[in-house]
Amino acid sequence: MSTQDDEYKTTQISTGSGSGPSDSGLASEQTSLLSGVGDGTDNTGGQVDDSTRWHGGLDLGLLLLRVVVGGTMAVHGAQKLFGVFDGPGIGGFADALGGMGYTSQTTLLSWLTALAEFGGGLLLALGLFTWIGASAVLGVMANIVFVKFDNGLSMSNGGFEYELVLGTVALALLFTGSGRVALDKNTPWRRKPMPFAILGVLIAAAASVVVIVLAR
C-alpha cells in the first residue's frame, strides 16, 4: 500500500509541476497582446506616429472651422471678383477701398484682396495647402482690423470684432493644421504644422505691412 501511495503522490506532483510552463506561456501571450496599449508603442515595441492617428472630436471640429470660415471667405471673395451675391465687383470694391483711406493702386489692391479671400477661403474649406489659405485670410483680416481699429471692437460702431474672430480662427488653423478630414492628410504641413505656421504668420504680417505702407 505504501508503495502504491508513493507512486500516486509522485504522479500528482509531476502533473501539478507540469502546469507551470503552460500558465507562464499563457501569461506571456496575454502580455504581448496588451503591449503598446496606452503607452504610445505598437506590438513590436516601435513608436506610434500620433500624427496619423484618428482623433474624432478634434478632426471633426477642425473640419467645421475650416468649412465655415473658408466658405464665408470664399463667398466674400466671389462678391468682389464676380459681383455675385449682391457683391460690388472689382470696381465697386476699389471705390470702397478709397473710402477706407487707401489712396493708391486701389484697383490692384481690390484684385489682390478678392483673390486672397476667394482662393484662401477655398483652400481652407478643402483642407488643401491649408497653411497658405490661412495665411491669405489672416493677412486680409489684419488689414481690416487696422483700418477699423479707431472704431473700437463693437460692430455697432463699425468696429472690428467680426474680422478679429475670422483672423483668429485663421491664425489658430495655421498652428493646428487642417486635421485628418482634409486633402492635406498626408502632407508634412499637417503632420508638423509649426514651421509652416511660423512662415505663414511672417508672410501675412509682411504682406499687411507692405499694403498699409504703400497703399495708404
Image (cartoon, rainbow, N blue to C red):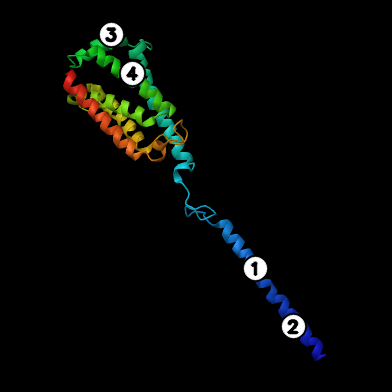
Residue drawn at 76 percent across, 80 percent down: 11
Say if 73 sits above or below 173 in the image. Answer: above
User: Along the polypeptide, which appears first: circle 2 or circle 1?
Assistant: 2
User: Along the polypeptide, which appears first: circle 2 or circle 3?
Assistant: 2
Q: Are marks 2 and 3 in contact (CB under 8 Å)?
A: no
For the question of whether residue 58 can be seen, the reply is yes
Q: Which residue is mark 3?
A: 91
Q: Are marks 4 and 2 in contact (CB under 8 Å)?
A: no
Q: Are marks 2 and 1 in contact (CB under 8 Å)?
A: no
Quadrant of residue 12 in the image? bottom right
What secondary structure is marked by label 1? helix
Task: Sort mark 3 into few (<14), some (14-19) or many (20+) by Cα contacts within 10 Å.
Answer: some
Say if 11 sits above or below 148 in the image. Answer: below
Q: Identify the disc placed on residue 10.
A: 2
Residue 174 picture location, percent across and down = 34, 34
Q: Which residue is mark 1?
A: 23
Q: Amino acid at mark 1?
A: Asp
Q: CA distance from mark 2 to mark 3?
A: 103 Å
Q: Are marks 3 and 4 in contact (CB under 8 Å)?
A: no
Residue 189 picture location, percent across and down = 39, 36
Q: CA distance from mark 4 to mark 2?
A: 90 Å
Q: Which residue is mark 4?
A: 115
